[in-house]
Amino acid sequence: MKFSDIIGNEKAIEQIRRVVDSDHIPHALLLHGDPGIPKLALARATAQYIHCTNREHGDSCGRCPSCLQHQSLNHGDTFFSFPVTGKGENTTSDLFIDEWRKFITESPIENYEYWLALLKNENAQPLIYAAESNSILRKMSLSSFTAKYKILIMWLPEKMNEACANKLLKLIEEPDPDSIFILVSNNAKEILPTIFSRTQRIELRRPSVEQIARYFAASLGTDYNDALVAAAAADGNVKQALQNLEASSETKAFHEKFVQLMRLAYLRDLKSLKTWSEQIADFKREKARRFLIYCARMVRENFIYNLKVPQLNYLTREEQQFSTRFAPFINEQNVEQMIAEFSRAESDIQRNANAKIVLFDLAVKITLLIKK
């Protein structure tokens, strides 16, 4: 993992780069921010940069033996600690190292729900148990194997139970000169205050919509417009943006049904609209609600499309092709009413109203609004 693989947070990366280059690395660094920000990835990139023997252009080289070991998760002086579940007070991270390697290999943007799934106990509350502190003490007391510094990356230190946190406190207060702790937190307020106060803290910010879209386009080969739509709906949460992107098949299906609704409403084909409402009702409640939320968004996007300012729109290629013809039908006379009708229908379905009746009533109202 290199700094160039991280989405956004250039100021944080530059701050880390300066302290490493000057060899004034804090013995305990806390990277914290909202869930969905790739903080663990930055922690891994920081460890790789510290250990790299051939840094270039402000980043690790990715080619030296140290970098290759980091990329294969086999660096002898890098250790991981993380919350686990299922085996009681004597549980340590080492028992789940295979699951951990799978987790950070397949989920570079840390996904807590995916970690729970890998632990095969999605209803439990993972913790970092007291035994973990003894394991950490043993590892960090060893002499460095190949590098100047030993590094421990702890994911979610707020999940330490009190016994573990108190034992670890002494190690952080009086670390060996060759020991570095990188803590990665989703909620720094829940970390034991005595540990929190002894860290150098860097708060990470949500990347911009454009940064996320560029990253997806470059790393995943995704169409930039599709990536832009997924990122815009996630409000800077990279994990959610990726999930939105993976759900694009549902979005395409929703788009087809939205187009069908608008065409039938324009034609005032009530018989076909009744069939349409029955098909949407067959989605069941939660999927029908998601569809109606999508419809309200499409109405807003088409109203904005009329402004002829492309950077204000977040439309996939298919949506954009439809909007070139459809947008003129959304104007000041009907935009607010249309959005209100979709929102009202979504709310009614949430409250278990008869979906077929709600949706047919919605369709009839759209026929009256579309030609305003």
Image (tube, rainbow, N blue to C red):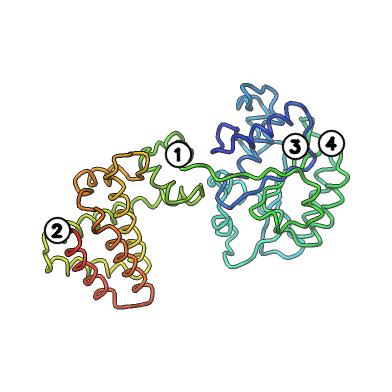
Q: Is residue 338 left or right of residue 135?
A: left
- Of the numbered discs 4 and 1, the one sitting upstream in the chain is 4
Q: Tag 1, which secondary structure?
A: helix
Q: Are marks 2 and 1 in contact (CB under 8 Å)?
A: no
Q: Residues within 10 Å of mark 1 (few under 14, many from 20)?
A: some
- Of the numbered discs 2 and 1, the one sitting upstream in the chain is 1
**Which is in the foreground here, disc 4 or disc 2?**
2
The amino acid sitting under disc 4 is Ser
The amino acid sitting under disc 3 is Asp
Q: Is residue 333 left or right of residue 177?
A: left
Q: Tag 3, which secondary structure?
A: loop
Q: Residues within 10 Å of mark 2 (few under 14, many from 20)?
A: some
The amino acid sitting under disc 2 is Tyr
Looking at the rendering, which quadrant does residue 263 occupy?
A: bottom left
Cα–Cα span, label 2 and label 1: 35 Å
Q: Are marks 4 and 1 in contact (CB under 8 Å)?
A: no
Q: Residues within 10 Å of mark 4 (few under 14, many from 20)?
A: some
Cα–Cα span, label 4 and label 3: 9 Å
- Of the numbered discs 1 and 3, the one sitting upstream in the chain is 3
Q: Tag 4, which secondary structure?
A: loop
Cα–Cα span, label 4 and label 2: 75 Å
**Which is in the foreground here, disc 4 or disc 1?**
1
Residue identified by numbered label 3:
77
- Of the numbered discs 2 and 3, the one sitting upstream in the chain is 3
Residue identified by numbered label 1:
210
**Residue located farthest toward the front when viewing the structure as drawn:** 332
Residue identified by numbered label 2:
266
Residue identified by numbered label 4:
143
Cα–Cα span, label 2 and label 3: 67 Å
Quarter of the picture containing the N terminus is top right
Q: Is residue 34 above or below residue 271?
A: above
